[in-house]
Amino acid sequence: MSANDVSFGVFILSKQAHDMVFQIYANTLGVDPSVIPGMIAGACALDSLIVLAIAAFKWRASWWPQTKEMVSHYWSDDIDEEIIPDYAHQYGKSGRVHPAE
């Protein structure tokens, strides 16, 4: 909002404060101020991926066996009725859902 000068009368949200802060960051990093928003977006994306990877590793015991079983059932058409998981019975043998459903 500050980049578009929507400040609601508060100086900290003004375009002038925005430009001043980004100029300080640019001088510190030695880059052009217009590059900083992309750098921040990239850092947020990387941090999010790291947090998701840590969470997936932590909870892998609960989701990995189900995912492995579901993928193996999805790609094979000759499935024994006894090994089909409960959730697959509502969709048929292959576990695939028709797009109209």
Image: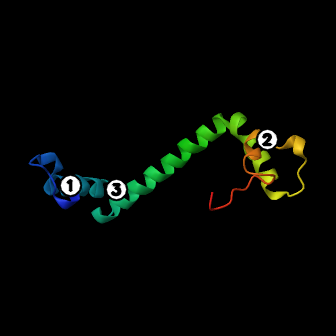
Q: Are marks 2 and 1 in contact (CB under 8 Å)?
A: no
Q: Which residue is mark 2?
A: 85
Quote the CA–CA distance across marks 2 and 3: 54 Å
Give neighbour class at mark 2: few <14, some 14-19, many 20+ (Cα, 10 Å): some
* Disc on the earlier residue, 3 or 1: 1
Report the amino acid beneath label 2: Pro
* Disc on the earlier residue, 2 or 3: 3
| Number of numbered discs | 3
Image location of residue 100, percent across then percent down: 62, 61
Give neighbour class at mark 3: few <14, some 14-19, many 20+ (Cα, 10 Å): few
Report the amino acid beneath label 1: Ser
Report the amino acid beneath label 3: Leu
* Disc on the earlier residue, 2 or 1: 1
- Observer-side mark, 2 or 1, equals 2
- Of all residues, the one furthest to the left in this rendering is 9
- Seen at 44% across and 56% down, the residue is 42
Relative placement, left or right, of 33 versus 98 is left
Q: Which residue is mark 3?
A: 29
Residue 87 against residue 27 in the figure, above or below: above
Quote the CA–CA distance across marks 2 and 1: 52 Å
Give neighbour class at mark 1: few <14, some 14-19, many 20+ (Cα, 10 Å): some
Q: Quadrant of the C terminus?
A: bottom right
- Observer-side mark, 2 or 3, equals 2
- Seen at 70% across and 34% down, the residue is 62
- Which image quadrant for residue 56? top right
Residue nearest the viewer, comparing 56 with 70: 70
Image location of residue 53, percent across then percent down: 60, 44
Relative placement, left or right, of 67 versus 50 is right
What's the mark number on residue 2? 1
Q: Are marks 2 and 3 in contact (CB under 8 Å)?
A: no
Image location of residue 96, percent across then percent down: 73, 56
Residue 69 against residue 35 in the figure, above or below: above
